Amino acid sequence: MKSVKVSIPWLLLIAIVAVTALPPAKKAEVRRNIRQCSAEADVLTRDSIKVLKGDFKNNGDNMKQFVVCMFRKIEFLGDDDEFDDDIIREKLSENIEEDEVNTLMDKCAITKDKLTDTCWERFKCFFKNHKVPSDMMDF
């Protein structure tokens, strides 16, 4: 039986729970989070969307702060700014086989001196190591 795969970056950034196209309410929530985090990080929304689609050229501190904000919005970062691996694993396991979740989480357990750098590098790692279906990137 062929497994259905969903992009880990998509899951990480919006905590999607279905492998089909997002329903309108979920798309609205994603767009709202992108706008709010873009404003909070003082970056253009269109630049934030580029990052979400894998264009990592804009890697300044503000863009890294955008990624941190998105991680907080979906509660992958707790109030203490620590990653909640249990929540991440639970949400990813809804759509990705457990072995793949474990492999990706192990491979992408990157820690840097600053939270912004840690979140940025983890997001890039997940994105680069798991194919993102183009139809999942329509926000």
Image (tube, helix red, strand yellow):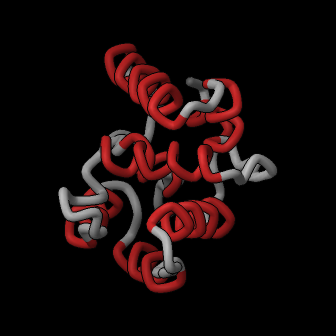
Q: Is residue 85 above or below residue 30?
A: below
Q: Is residue 38 left or right of residue 135?
A: left
- Choose top left, top right, bottom left or bottom right for residue 73: top left
- Choose top left, top right, bottom left or bottom right for residue 106: bottom left
Q: Is residue 20 left or right of residue 122?
A: left
Residue at screen point 43% across, 77% down? 105
Residue at screen point 71% across, 49% down? 54
**Toward the viewer: 131 or 1?**
131
Q: Is residue 112 above or below residue 118?
A: below
- Residue 52: where, in percent of width, then height? 61, 42
**Toward the viewer: 40 or 15?**
40
- Residue 16: where, in percent of width, then height? 36, 41
* Quadrant where the N terminus is found in the figure: bottom left
Q: Is residue 87 left or right of residue 50?
A: left
The mark total stands at 0
- Determine the residue located farthest toward the right in the rendered image: 57
**Toward the viewer: 40 or 29?**
40
- Residue 19: where, in percent of width, then height? 43, 42
Residue at screen point 48% across, 22% down? 35
* Quadrant where the C terminus is found in the figure: top right
- Residue 37: where, in percent of width, then height? 45, 33
Q: Is residue 71 above or below residue 111?
A: above
Residue at screen point 64% across, 33% down? 49
